[in-house]
Amino acid sequence: MAQKDANFLGPCTCIQESQSIGWTGKIEVEAHVVTIRNAAAADDAGLLNPLLKRWQDEACSQMVFGLPAVQSVINFKWDRWARKLLLLEFAFYMVWLLAFQVFMLLFQDEDLSMTLSQLVETKRGIITVASEALALLGMTPFSYIEICTVLEYGPKRWLSIWNLMDLATYFLQIAIDVLHLSRLNVRSEILSILVASQCLLLWLKIQYFARVFQPTKNAFVDTLRSVVADVKWFLLFLVLTMWGFAGAFYILFREDQQQFQEFSTIWHAWLTMFNFMVSGFEFGIFYDCHNPEAAICLVVLYMFVVAVIFLNLLVGIMTDSWSKVKDNEGLRFLCSKAEVIDEIETVVPWWVKSRNPEWYPAYIHVLKVNPESADEVEMDSMWSRIGGNREESILDDKTELNVKLAKITKQLEALQAAMHMQGKITVNNQSASTNSKNGQQDIDDSKDDDTQAEREETFGKSD
């Protein structure tokens, strides 16, 4: 890019007042303009959509969302229209979630021997059918959003574990409604398993909205995704190690499988190993088997390898991963906003966009608080908007502290320069005074020499 992405227009002064506690203060803000024409345009014509696609293809770093021009586009779109549309989407989701919860509670005690016609003859049955119909209606906007997202990004970019979970909620909702209303296999455990799975997935999806309405350090889904990405191979090695010990215990207890159900099958043995790892075990099981010495040695080795070494390593890796996630929480917050904005933008009809030209100005103008006056207004971070909450902070506390320390350092340097200048002035004054005294002494000596010469000349004439 040949030109800068944001130009400085000039400073101005704002007055911040608080009548409740009776104080006033002046802050300096700077006017900037994003000089990329149509940076806020929709879809591929704008700045966010191409950047998101490159980031998803791992062609650019997440740091690109921290650039001032990209931040300005994200904040402009979020404040102008994206936040309102996301709240509307959240309202539809709450309809879906609450309606399904009502259906789940009523389905728990439903008489499964009744037909659909018999069910709707009761007040409880009417509420049950109405709630699942309302849940299906609340799901409809999200299925439309998912289809538009797949068409925009393509299956390769769309494919992820979280999108697959969203897709599972749509299929589960349809399957539950079909099985329940048609009364097919309604007495089997399949429907109960589907309802239980849907209940868990729906509550988990709330984190999709929470990650842009609260600090990212509290966003469970994003944090879990980053932690799992760091520990996945370690977890695989841990599972394989537990499987090896499970096979060893399964062989040792082959003559005691009728007495001890914990090792009756290889799967029971693996579940027993998992239970030993998280909650401990009783040594009485190993004392009563046919090979107590070998069993005791094996269990001690298992506890040392898995419970002592592996679990502590796992805690250390997860702690390190959490620290890395927290260090980049500002960028993750911006990136989450950009993803939500672009997803909403892909489903907004063209006629809505054409009727709101103020959503897509040719240039974006931004006012930002001067970082040097940050400590005077106690702003949360350099890139917080005026009046913003701590949740909207982009820079972390360490960066903010560095800004304040830099200002204090600059003030100390200015004070040191002033003191140095004052010292120079004092030395010059003393030097000038000394030179003046020396000059006066030279004049007096010159006068004495002239007087002496006149006397000698006078004496010479007299002789």
Image: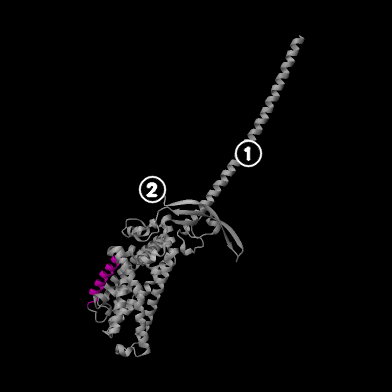
At a point 61% along the width and 41% down the height, the residue shown is: 422
Q: Which residue is mark 1?
A: 426
The front one of 306 and 343 is 343
Q: Which quadrant of the structure image shows residue 13?
A: bottom right
Q: Earlier in the sequence, mark 1 or mark 2?
A: 2
At a point 41% along the width and 74% down the height, the residue shown is: 91
Q: Residue 199 location in percent, x, y?
A: 35, 77
Q: Residue 271 location in percent, x, y?
A: 29, 75
Q: Is residue 239 magenta?
A: yes
The front one of 93 and 292 is 93
Name the kind of residue labelled 1 in the image.
Thr
At a point 65% along the width and 32% down the height, the residue shown is: 434
Q: Residues within 10 Å of mark 2 (few under 14, many from 20)?
A: few
**Is residue 305 among the parts visible in the rendering?**
no
Q: Is residue 297 magenta?
A: no
Name the kind of residue labelled 2 in the image.
Ala
Up/down of 78 relative to 6, above or below: below
The front one of 436 and 59 is 59
Q: Residue 144 location in percent, x, y?
A: 33, 71
The front one of 85 and 422 is 85
Q: Secondary structure at mark 2?
A: loop
Q: Secondary structure at mark 1?
A: helix
In the image, farthest residue toward the top: 463
Q: Which residue is mark 2?
A: 2
Image check: 8 left or right of 257?
right
Q: Residue 261 location in percent, x, y?
A: 27, 80
Tell me which segment is drawn in magenta.
Answer: 236-254
